[in-house]
Image (cartoon, rainbow, N blue to C red):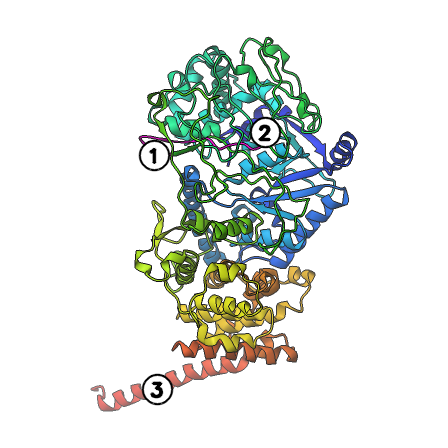
Amino acid sequence: MGVRGLQGFVGSTCPHICTVVNFKELAEHHRSKYPGCTPTIVVDAMCCLRYWYTPDSWICGGQWREYFSALRDFVKTFTAVGIKLIFFFDGMVEQDKRDEWVKRRLKNNREISRIFHYIKSHKEQPGRNMFFIPSGLAVFTRFALKTLGQETLCSLQEADYEVASYGLQHNCLGILGEDTDYLIYDTCPYFSISELCLESLDTIMLCREKLCESLGLCVADLPLLACLLGNDIIPEGMFESFRYKCLSSYTSVKENFDKKGNIILAVSDHISKVLHLYQGEKKLEELLPLGPNKALFYKGMASYLLPGQKSPWFFQKPKNVITLDKQVISMSSDPESRQEVPMCTDPESRQEAPMCTDPESRQEVSMCTDPESRQEVPMCTDPESRQEVPMCTGPESRQEVLMWTDSESRQEIIMYTGHESKQEVPVCTDPISKQEDSMCTHPEINQKLPIATDPEFKLICTNPEIKQEDPANMGLEIKQQVTMVSDTEILKVARAHHVQAESYLVYNIMSSGEIECSNTLEDELDQALPSQAFIYRPIRQRVYSLLLENCQDVASTCPAVKEWFVYPGNPLRHPDLVRPLQMTVPGGTPSLRILWLNQEPEIQVRRLDTLLACFNLASSREELQAVESPFQALCCLLIYLFVQVDTLCLEDLHAFIAQALCLQGKSTSQLVNLQPDYINSRAVQLGSLLVRGLTTLVLVNSACGFPWKMSDFMPWNVFDGKLFHQKYLQSEKGYAVEVLLEQNRSRLTKFHNLKAVVCKACMKENRRITGRVHWGSHHADNKCGLLLRFLCVDLVLSLLHAVLCSAFPLST
C-alpha cells in the first residue's frame, strides 16, 4: 500500500524522519494545550488487522475468542490513558485502485497455493512468514469494536482519504496505521502501528516535514512525488523511464544508498530544481510525459488533497464545477492566486501555515518538533505572499465536489470533496432514531454519493468566481454517478448503516451495483468442495432481488450486479455479472420501506420470513424457530450448506455442531491451550467456508431489516478454528458423539435436537446426509475388524490355490 519504495527509503535512507514517541505523554501535552478536548487517534483499521491478530493459530478458520480478547486489551490500554480511538474501515474499492486490488488478490492466490502444499506435506500450520489473515477478519472486527463500545466507521471511498480528512478536520492527536500515503497527505501526525509497543504505548512517528527537508521539497510537492514514484492509483511502470532519466542526470548519487533510494532522491531533485522553475507558468503535461494518462495522473494528484486544500501544481481550471453544497472553492491556481493556497490549520487557534509557491523561498523550512503543532508547520512560501487563508471555516462550512471525466478514457475525475453542513451524524442502531451522539463527528464525504437523486443535492454548473478554461485544454466533461436504486430515503438509510458499520455490502449493491470479496483459504486442487463464491451466490442473488426492488417482478430485465469474488481459476480480468434471483416469501416479498422503516411488532415476522427465503428455507421456519439462541442462525447456515454441497457428510455435521456446543463452556485460556493432533487440508477449507457463511448471514440480516441479533452469528459466539479442527479429526476417525461432546450429558440432548433440525430440513430438499465408511481408527475393535478382513482374504486365497492345484495337478 502507499507510495512505491517510500517505506524502505524512510527506514534505510532517512531514519531521522522516524521519532520515538509515547502516546501517554502526547495525550497529556494535548490536554494541556487544548483544555476540555479529548485526545483522539484516528485508526486505519485495515492497516492494523495483522497487528491485532495475535493468536498463534490462523490456519483453522480463526481463533475468534482470542482475537476479541486482544481487541479488548488494545482498547483498554488507550482508554486507560484518556485517549479516544476512532476506527475507519474500507467501505469500497475505488475504480482507479481496482487494478492494484486485483494484483494483490492474485498474489494472495499464489501464497494460498503454497500454504496448502505445505499443509499436505507437513500436516501442520506453516510458520508466521506465511501468515494469512483468517477469512472475514475485517468484517467481524467492525462488529467486535462496536461491541466494545468504540466509534467505528465505514468509508464511502478509500478509507485512507477519510482517515486523513477526519484527523485534519477534528484536530486529532494523530493517525495510527501503516501506509506511506499518510506521509503524503497534509494532515495530522502519522504513527506506525507495526512499531507500537502496547505495554509502554511507545511507537514511531513519521514526520512529513523532516521528509520534505531531506528531499528538498515542500509538503505541497509530496503528492506530485508520490504519483511520479507510483501508488495505488498510478501504476509503478507508468513513469519508469522518466525516473531513470532523472537518475541519469542526478549528480548527487549516494553510493551507500540502494537503487530505489537514489531514484527517490533523483526525482525529488528534478521536482525542486526543474519543475519548480515553471510552477504556475506551464501545465504539468508540458513538463511531464503524461501522454494518454493525463486524466489518471491528475486524479492521482487530487486524491491527496483534503477538503479545503489546493495544489500549486494545478495550473488549469476545471471546465465546469459540480457543487453539492453552497460554498464553491477552486482547485486550480494561477500566478495571481498562488498566495491563496491554504494549509492545515488548527481549528481552535485559527493559525494558518501557507504552502510553498515560490521555489526561491526555501530558507524558511525548519524541523517538526511537536506532532501537534500543525499551526507551526514551517512551509517554504513566497516571502511576498504571506497572506493567510483559513482552511477550517466551522461546522457550517459547505464545500463542494469537483468532478470531471476524461473525454477519451471516460475516467471519472473527482478532485476533492467537502463535508456536509452537519458534521455530527447520528449514532444509533435504529436508522429512524433522531437522537444524536455528540461524540460521533464523522465527516460524510460525498465523493461516491448519488448525485441528482437526493433533493438535498443541488447541481451548480458554474460560478462567477471560477474562471473557465477552454474545454480543449483539458478534454474534460462532467459525468454524473448513477445509482441502482431510485428511492432516496431508502438509499439514505442504507448509507447511514454503511457509514456506522452496521451493515455489510448492502449500500454497495444499492449505490454502485458492485461488490467484492477477497481471498479465502481454498485448495484449488480439491475438486470435491466448490468455492464459497459459488456456494453462497444464490443467497446473494436473492438479496439483489430484494434490494433492487424494480427486479422483483421481472428479474430478466434487471441489471446485473458486478461481483469481484476471488476463487480458484478466476483471473479477475473483469467482474462476474450476476443477475438477481426471484425468491418466494409467504405473503409476498415486502418492500424495503416495510422491512426497514416500519416498526410495528408484526413486521418482525415478515423480516424473518424474508431472511429464510433468501436461504430458500421458508419451509423450515417452524423447526428453526424452536432452536435456541445463538444456534438458530448456525442451523440455518448448516442446512443451506448441506443442501448445496453434496460432498458434505454426517461426520462434518457432527463436527460443526459439536464445536459450537463445546465452545459455549470454554474460556479463552482453554482455547489458547487447545492443540489439534495435526492439520487437515479439508478441515481448513471447511472452517473458512463456515466463516464466509457467517459474513453472508451479516449481509442477509442487514438487507432484511435485522430480524436476528447480529451477536448470534458473530464467530466468537459460534465458532473456533482449533476447536472445530479437533472435532473434525475426532469425527473423521469415528469417535462416538459422547467423545465429541467431551462426555457432557447436557450437551448430548442439544446435539441430537440440532442434528435433527438440520437433517429434517435437508430431507425436505431431498438431501439425505450420510456418513463415510471408516477403514480404521484408534479403537481396538476397529483394528480387530480390519485384521479379520485381511485374514478372510488370506483364507480365500489359500482355498482358491488348493482348488486350482487339485484341478490342474503338476506332471511328475
Q: What is the spatial separation of the Cα atoms under label 3 and label 1, in whole angstroms?
A: 78 Å
The residue at which mark 2 appears reads as 11
Q: Where is 221 relative to 98, above or below?
A: above
Residue at left 55%, top 8%? 360
Residue 770 in the image: x percent, y percent? 43, 78
Chain-order first, disc 3 or disc 2: 2
Residue 140 in the image: x percent, y percent? 57, 54
Element assignment for label 1? loop
For the magenta stretch, what is the residue range?
Answer: 398-411
Which residue type does callout 2 highlight?
A: Gly
The residue at which mark 1 appears reads as 410
Residue 282 in the image: x percent, y percent? 42, 14
In the drawing, what numbered circle is on residue 796? 3
Chief secondary structure of the magenta span? loop
Residue at left 60%, top 41%? 442
Element assignment for label 3? helix
Q: Nearer the viewer, mark 3 or mark 1?
A: 1
**Residue found at the very far left of the displayed protein:** 811
Chain-order first, disc 3 or disc 1: 1
Chain-order first, disc 2 or disc 1: 2
Q: Is residue 103 left or right of residue 376?
A: left
Which residue type does callout 1 highlight?
A: Arg
Residue at left 59%, top 46%? 153
Specify whether residue 475 is painted magenta. no
Element assignment for label 2? helix
